[in-house]
Amino acid sequence: MPNIDVKKPIVEINGDEMARVMWDKIKSELIFPFLNLKLIEFDLGIKNRDKTDDKVTTEAGLAIKKYNIGVKCATITPDDKRVQEFNLKKKYPSPNGTIRNILNGTIFREPIIINKIPRFIRHWSESVIIARHAFGDIYKSQEIKTNKKGKLYLKFESDDKEVLIEKEVCKFDSPGVGLSYFNSNKSIHDFAKSCFNFGLRRKLPVYLSTKNTILQSYDESFKEIFEQVYNDKFKKEFEKHNIFFQHRLIDDMVACLVKWTGGFLWACKNYDGDVMSDLVAQGFGSLGLMTSVLQSPDGKIIETEAAHGTVTSHYRQHQLGLNTSTNPIASIFAWTRALHHRSKIDSNKQLEIFAKKLEDSCKYTLNEGMMTKDLALMVGPDQKWLTTDELLKAVNYNFRNK
Ligand code: NAP
Ligand code: MG
């Protein structure tokens, strides 16, 4: 098989622990033997982030912005225990958060469907992609607790100190709690654009869920902004490809998720996306089969990764010199999805075929009953499982020979 030339580079971000061990193997066994590819490399391993005072993370985000495509290995987000473990100068923020802010992006989570792996709902035959609006709502809220009688107000004061709105929320006769949160039209607008561009790229219908029957200003704004962006900029293109946009109530949408066979993009408000992405991940199998794409509003820039973390529990085994059965499939798909985007931008048909064939080889291998332990446990007690190295070898063999 001759090597395929990839003219323009992609940004590669290395990470931590077991994810990094798998990452390096995927590169050397499944990518570089087949592609003449230039990488713009960043080491976001926790030690290098500490060494560079986390500047390397910002540099990586800016590089993705410049080159349009990034592929990222899972990284440690330090907590107090990690600060101690690695003797860090400080508790650095999540690299994913830093990069998301630079790209102003939306995260799309997509499960990989494998026929042989049972799903929570048997008739889910196509994937459901969850887009989470990662801005505002309860995650940027102010909350109170009160044990006195009294009144709670919601007040809006303009910059010139005029109180334009003041509403009584509740008259407390006994102890209680209160909450206030917000969102911005600009952020909802960018979220809508991200979702429609993603839907268009993947030729999938887009659903937005809200509770606008109750929140007639707040959630209604989400619906109105989505409809406006859709009608102004996307409707014609969507219709050309026989896809559409629809708003549904969140409770109705949850019922549809269970009833339907999949094959749609679901735009979720922040909290709904937090909950639904975990439900969908578990419902479709394992975290090892869940991919994650961060995409800019205009759809031009993407960063792909596996949705799982650095799999610390397996890394501890690896450190003891033991072979582990950690699932590399989502990490391989991070590569294929990034390479697919490269192929589309560059009109590189050979690269497009390579990415598709590598994904097909992964699916074929799993369907032939060669899989890691996380998936074997789902298939049943008689299902045998392979180590990560054995599975990568099987994928490689099937890629070359099937
Ligand atoms: P995790 O790495 O996703 O692992 C949680 C558990 O899920 C594992 O212990 C393992 O279960 C199972 N698992 C996850 N990925 C798997 C795979 N590929 N193959 C087989 N099993 C898999 O989450 P965590 O343990 O909560 O976090 C570990 C570190 O990752 C933390 O430092 C966190 O900050 C970081 N993290 C990074 C990202 C990211 O970079 N995007 C995302 C999440 C977490 P068993 O132990 O039962 O086998
Ligand atoms: Mg969650």
Image (cartoon, rainbow, N blue to C red):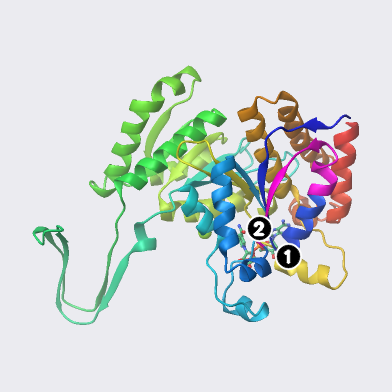
Q: Cβ(mark 2) to ligand 1 < 8 Å?
A: yes
Instruction: State the mark number for residue 17.
Output: 1
Residue at figure coordinates x 36%, y 56% from the top left: 136
Left or right, 45 with respect to 198, comes to right
140 lies above or below 332: below
Q: Residues within 10 Å of mark 2 (few under 14, many from 20)?
A: many
Q: Does 386 lie within the magenta span?
A: no
Q: Which mark is residue 74?
A: 2
The answer to whether one can see residue 320 in this image is: yes
Q: Does 29 appear in magenta? A: yes
Point 35% across, 36% down: residue: 226
Q: Which residue is at the front of the view, 80 or 216?
A: 80
146 relative to 250 in the view: left or right: left
Tell me the number on the disc at residue 39.
Answer: none
The picture places residue 183, in percent across and down from the top left corner, at 31, 53
| Label 1 within 8 A of ligand 1 by Cβ | yes
Spatial CA distance of label 1 from label 2 is 9 Å
Give residue 381's quadrant in the image: bottom right
Region rendered in magenta: 27-44
Residue 237 located left or right of residue 282: left
Amino acid marked by disc 2? Ala
Percent x, y for residue 45?
68, 64
Residue 391 position in % (x across, y down): 85, 49
